[in-house]
Image: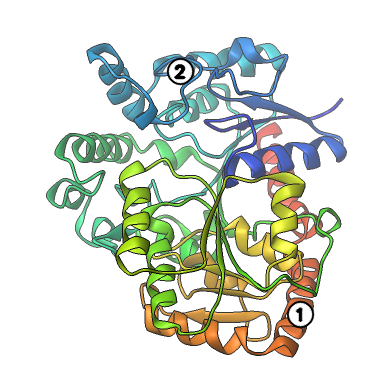
């Protein structure tokens, strides 16, 4: 009989990294003989599923994905606060799913706020092992990003969760910061994460940060994120532009790419591929471009699938100017799989991805260092080609589905076998 594994995440449709990871890992599980069961929030955008009856009701309506897209009345605000701490509905739905489908293991991805860690309690009650992948820093950082005032911040780890309120780390507002701090404090008091059998850390920075926060090292496993090289045809030619592709958001450091462009005198087209869920930040980028009279900056909008891959393949190289410790950005892996060098901030999971023969690491939030590396690479076509080939090889050897799934599968099987005894 097939082993049944529930994969839980706040969204069940193609959007950002965690959702793409969810769909990829479910496909790998099914191809290896498991039955992969989604557990998510009910949304109109979701992939149709026979398990929809177990999904959690949304905090807003089923068409709304992001908080800033919603119209929140008092009841919605109460539910948001409740879900941040402990969702009894999510716990009940998970209990029903485990009981009715004879689930063997639950793999948690992005569950904060929309689902909440209450589902861990459901697993504990049923004696089902839980594996949790840490796609951001929400267990140990109030704003998820280890970021305050554009600088790396680990105050919550060193000085306690109250720092989140003190500095208004969530949206620079008291109430959201209080909500996050209260939720983290309750989770720590009831020790809900003690029941998690293993934490999957996509990068070495995440593992170290969790150890620093007091989590047991024997439960922490570093397993690289992956892309399937077979889905990315490399190209070592280009159409003469630099590419950024990701969300146009504060923590991604897009403004530092623009500031670096200001320091560069050469004509150098930059394509910005992605959308923004922060209209104020997005407008600030446009205002900066206009005020500094920057040329050759092109906003392309959101792209996906083959269209996005085509933009990557036709670029000279890709820039990832993040100012937060991105866990393991899929953008870097996709660029390398397409045979492109990457210039990225020396922080978080980006540090693990880029080597000296596949691109350049630069100081975060340092336009001068970024501009220097961009100019060096822009003017060396042979280096671009060789680094691109090295990047493709690195993906095949260290960031493939097989290496990821082999390590993850061993953890799954070990946990299932222990629970069966």
Q: Residue at x 82, y 35 (%)?
A: 30
Q: Position of residue 396 (x, y in %)?
A: 80, 67
Q: Is residue 395 left or right of residue 297?
A: right
What residue would you read off at disc 2? 58
SS class of the residue under badge 1?
helix
The quadrant of the image that shows the C terminus is: top right
The quadrant of the image that shows the N terminus is: top right
**Residue extending furthest toward the left:** 166
The circle drawn on residue 116 is: none
Question: What's the CA distance linking mark 2 and mark 1?
Answer: 44 Å
Q: Which one is nearer the viewer's eye here, 327 or 309?
A: 309
Residue 93 position (above or below residue 147): above
Q: Nearer the N terminus, badge 2 or badge 1?
A: 2
Asked where in the image residue 286 lies, by quadrant, the reply is bottom left
What residue would you read off at disc 1? 390
Q: Position of residue 112 (x, y in %)?
A: 42, 35
Q: Which one is nearer the viewer's eye here, 91 or 342?
A: 342
Q: Position of residue 61 (x, y in %)?
A: 44, 14
Q: Is residue 361 left or right of residue 336?
A: left
Q: Position of residue 32 (x, y in %)?
A: 86, 40
SS class of the residue under badge 2?
loop
Q: Is residue 10 left or right of residue 368?
A: right
Q: Residue at x 32, y 29 (%)?
A: 85
């Amino acid at each position: 009989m097939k082993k049944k594994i529930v994969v839980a995440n706040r969204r069940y449709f193609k959007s950002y990294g965690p959702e793409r990871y969810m769909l990829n890992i479910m496909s790998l599980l099914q191809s290896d003989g498991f039955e992969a069961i989604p557990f998510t929030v009910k949304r109109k955008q979701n992939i149709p599923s026979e398990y929809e009856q177990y999904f959690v009701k949304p905090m807003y309506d089923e068409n709304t994905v992001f908080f800033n897209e919603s119209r929140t009345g008092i009841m919605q605000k109460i539910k948001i606060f409740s879900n941040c701490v402990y969702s009894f509905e999510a716990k009940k739905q998970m209990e029903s799913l485990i009981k009715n489908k004879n689930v063997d293991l639950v793999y948690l991805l992005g569950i904060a706020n929309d689902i909440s860690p209450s589902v861990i309690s459901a697993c504990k009650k049923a004696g089902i092992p839980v594996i949790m992948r840490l796609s951001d820093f929400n267990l140990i950082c109030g704003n998820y990003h280890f970021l305050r005032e554009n600088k790396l911040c680990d105050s919550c780890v060193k000085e306690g969760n109250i720092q989140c309120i003190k500095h208004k780390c969530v949206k620079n507002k008291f109430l959201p910061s209080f909500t996050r701090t209260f939720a983290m404090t309750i989770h720590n008091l009831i020790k809900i994460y003690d029941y998690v059998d293993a934490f999957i850390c996509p990068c070495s920075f995440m593992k170290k940060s969790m150890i620093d926060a007091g989590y047991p090292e024997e439960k922490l496993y570093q397993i690289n994120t992956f892309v399937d090289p077979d889905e990315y045809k490399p190209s070592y030619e280009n159409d003469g532009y630099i590419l950024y592709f990701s969300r146009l958001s504060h923590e991604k450091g897009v403004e530092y790419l623009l500031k670096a462009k200001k320091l560069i005198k050469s004509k150098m087209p930059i394509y910005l591929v992605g959308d923004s869920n922060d209209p104020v930040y997005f407008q600030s980028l446009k205002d900066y471009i206009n005020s500094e009279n920057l040329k050759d900056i092109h906003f392309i909008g959101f792209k996906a699938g083959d269209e996005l891959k085509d933009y990557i393949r036709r670029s000279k190289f890709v820039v990832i100017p993040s100012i937060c410790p991105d866990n393991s950005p899929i953008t870097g892996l996709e660029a390398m799989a397409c045979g492109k060098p990457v210039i990225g901030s020396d922080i978080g999971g980006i540090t693990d991805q880029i080597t000296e023969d596949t691109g350049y690491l630069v100081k975060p939030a340092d336009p001068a260092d970024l501009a220097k590396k961009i100019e060096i690479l822009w003017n060396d076509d042979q280096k671009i080609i060789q680094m691109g080939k090295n990047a493709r090889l690195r993906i095949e050897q260290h960031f493939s589905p097989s290496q990821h799934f082999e390590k993850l599968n061993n953890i799954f099987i070990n946990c299932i076998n222990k629970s069966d005894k």
